[in-house]
Image: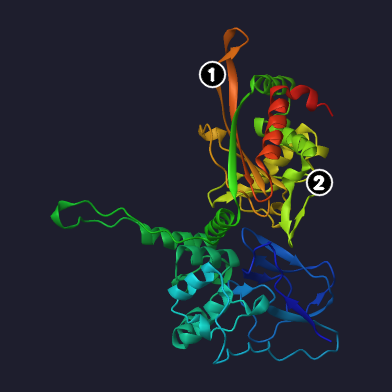
Amino acid sequence: MAIEIVVPRLGWSMEEGIFGEWLKQPGEEVVPGDMLFVLEGEKAAQEVESFDGGVLSIPAGAPQPGDTVQVGQLLGYLLAADETPPAELPARPAAAATAEPAVAGPAVRQLARELNVDLGQVCGTGGGGRVSAADVRLAAEENEPAAAALSRDKSRGKAISPRARRVARELEIDWTEIVGTGRTGRIRESDIRAAASQLSAPRGGQRGGGQRADHDRSNRISPLRKTIAQRMSAAAAETAAVTLHTEVDATNLVNLRGQFRAASDAQEGVPGYNDILVKLTALALGRHPDLQSQWREGALWVPGDVHIAIGIDTDQGLLAPVIRDVPARSLRQLAVETRRLAERARAGALTVDEMQGGTFTISNLGNYGVDAFTPIINLPQSAILGVGRIRQLPVVVGEQVLPRFVVSLSLTFDHRVHDGGPAARFLHTLREFIEQPGPWLID
């Protein structure tokens, strides 16, 4: 019997993704463990592993590279050696004329308005008949068959890489009009960006009245920015966020960092301030494990391990890769792992696994001269720590005013999950660890 290949859910809030490409050819043998296809989820593209074996069959009507696909959507089949492949993918069920009001989220409803799609005429394929963005886009295409046919005719015979197709979509470039510079005329990402540069180049002349040319612009919202917007909006809407602020004497922390630098020959393994703070935060969470609690199916689930996500600023947007099992790592191991994740984040090479499973998040804006800020909770977590810059201030110590290094900490927590007292006690413990870091960092 044919084994169905379907779109997996790569993230906790993922409803749809972008099909990248097949990593196996039709008719090729697939064994369990083989990477079968590429799927772009909320923040990263990932090679999807096959858990079954068989001969790959891709029927007519299967999604093409660059197509938007929904979670659970059928992509193809794995067949036995002598099995007859299905002729085509099953047809989607038509919407009933007397359908009940469609169940759809705010983002999907907004998309329906933009595409002039009547949600009442759309058959939802999500759980409980929920309408996804893919359902809306498909309905929009069915409403404009002529335009869809024209697009297919223009693109027929052209080859384009999945990455180039994605960039073309983000930059609103019609790639069917581009001549590729790759092998056999394949359109590459550089071709798309070159076309975009030509379109955005300033034109000569002035506007009437001697005014200068208009420099305003409208940027297309990338899939990553849409995901960030949805996550931030969900956190603001679904949590009762409260932020506690405190200032901590970081003089001993600064001295410890200086000792690490002086004693190290390999710059790569020198722990930075953020590495030390990640380690101390993990130790404080060990004393206050409930601060990692998460809502799960009507109950509060408390993780048994400490996996800390760290905010990384990239050209594409904010990413939060996860450092796993922080208490079990030495400071030098943390330094190496932090640099590795930061480099992969800025190169756009993070996998979904590297961004999932965090139990707590740290966002450090100290490098940008920020003293204090209010971080937004990274769902499904229930708390996040914001770290400001380390600055030197006059501080009263006993009967003296001395120059001391001070850092601001901002703990945002979900008041539905935590009361102010437990959150304040965690922050107090972390403050003690930062003020006297040495004893707590002995392995």
Q: Which residue is mark 2?
A: 305
Horizontal side of 79 relative to 389 (left or right) equals right
Neighbours of disc 2 within 10 Å: few (<14), some (14-19), many (20+)? some
Report the front residue among 60 and 10.
10
For the point 59% across and 54% down, which residue is it? 235
* Residue 36 in view of the camera: yes
Relative image position of residue 70 (x, y in whole percent) = 63, 74
For the point 68% across and 67% down, which residue is it? 38
Q: Determine contact: label 2, label 1, CB under 8 Å.
A: no
Q: Relative to residue 115, is residue 330 depicted above or below?
A: above
Neighbours of disc 1 within 10 Å: few (<14), some (14-19), many (20+)? few
* Residue 271 in view of the camera: no
Q: Quadrant of residue 200?
A: bottom left
Q: Relative to residue 66, is residue 118 depicted above or below?
A: below
For mark 1, give the secondary structure.
strand
Horizontal side of 106 relative to 3 (left or right) equals left
